[in-house]
Amino acid sequence: MLTAVIRKELRALLRDGRFAVLAVSMGLLLAGLLVVSAQQHRRLAAEKAEVAAAVRHQWDTQGDKHPHRGAHFGLYALRPDAPLAAIDPGLGPYLGQALWLEPHRRNMTRFRPAADEAPSVRFGQLTPAFALTALMPLLIIALGFNAVSAERESGTLRMLHGAGLRPGRLMAGKLAALLAVVALMLLACVGGGLLLAAAGGLPDADAFGRGGLLAASFLVYYGVFAALALAASAWLSTSRLSLFVLLGLWVTFVFVVPRLGAAAAERAVPLPSAERFWGDIQRDYTQGLPGDADLAARGRAFEAELLRRHGAARLEDLPFGVAAVRRMERDAYADRVHALHFDALWSRYASQERWLRAAAGLSPAVAMRAISMKLAGTDLAHQRHFEDAAEAYRRQVNTTIDEWDAGHTRGLTSFDDRYADDALWRSVAPFRYAPPGAGFAWTAALPDIALLLAWALAAAWLCIASLRRLQP
């Protein structure tokens, strides 16, 4: 009986003029967005590869100079985009894609075209993810708002009752038919996005795993809207009233709650200005962290310890490059100060994310948006993973050069001396970033997935509760 109901509902959907118009419109919109986004994804990847090669060539061919001046020439660490970033660019335009690596200082990411925009704007970007999160539920509402009320108004509901069809099976059949139609469009979008981003090749297993999890999450998300549409259609007396209520919920879920949640997060957990952030780091470095001496006193104590340890009276008499050893000591303290302040900044980002997650209790779209970004690898957790890897590489490069400097000189040297050449620069290994796997994304998305499942259970309960209203 259930199979017969599903077939009947699918035939009714296909014969409905609304479905043809809406499905074709949504299909064309998604196809256009995917093609444009995939082209941009490939172009950015090619530009990053070109920039990385050019920067590395410049580094390798600096010529003869003081090793510390060579270290200050610096390197760029460029973050590679995952294939699913073509579907959901997430926070990438806001967090930057490249890090400038230099001695003494941990930098912020650069190249953020949306740096001056409010975080709430990201909920309105026209991307494939926005179409899937915001517009596809509208299609579900348009197809399902009168799924039951139209049967009641036309009198066919009485005929179905008379034929012995149970209300639960009727509702389950309508829900399955609606989700089957949406699932086809969803799979075409996610699969097409992966293939387009891979430029016709096959994505790797990690991309397939993330794509599968993303498609399953979207299907649960659409199930929430489909169940709400059927419940409203069963509970409310007319199709028009059902449509008004569902449109109100759609606007609230997709636009109102996300923007209010972002504004509340910014107000509850404000971020420090760039001037204050770097000023605090400079203060703690020069004046010392609580319990530590200032920069000058730390330097005098370190030099005195060097002389005592090696039994020398002057720094010039030490059997290694004093300036390089002194830099390593200062940089170790600077790294400690930077780590404290950057960890505090990431904690504030995480607190803002928790505020947004609280808003997901009022909107399944907020939970779905977070899941989409995390599985696409364009969220805060993936960004921090990249920046931590780049910071570890920065320290490794500077330590390598300073150790070489300390081992190839004696006493104090002048910065005008040129005793390093291309052999030293080429001995520094290139930055090779290994993005985290699907398990990392799954773990990061678990709280949001739990919220989405809670929404699915609530919508299913409403749908079941509406069965008592399923009377002719």
Image (spheres, rainbow, N blue to C red):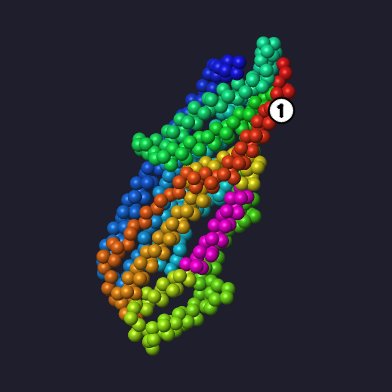
* Position in image of residue 182 (x %, y %): 53, 28
Locate residue 422 relative to residue 193 in the image: left or right. left
**271 vs 288, nearest the viewer:** 288
**13 vs 28, nearest the viewer:** 13
**14 vs 420, nearest the viewer:** 420
351 is within the stretch colored magenta: yes
Query: What's the amino acid at mark 1?
Result: Ala
**Predominant secondary structure in magenta?**
helix
**Res. 406 in view:** yes
Residue drawn at point x = 68 percent, y = 27 percent: 464
* Position in image of residue 147 (x %, y %): 63, 21
Judged from this view, the residue extending furthest toward the bottom is 313
Q: Residues within 10 Å of mark 1 (few under 14, many from 20)?
A: some
Tell me if residue 148 comes above or below residue 345 in the rendering.
Answer: above
Circle 1: element type? helix
Give the residue at mark 1: 465
Numbered label tally:
1
The magenta segment is 335-356
- Residue 99 quadrant: bottom left
**124 vs 410, nearest the viewer:** 410
Residue drawn at point x = 28 percent, y = 62 percent: 426
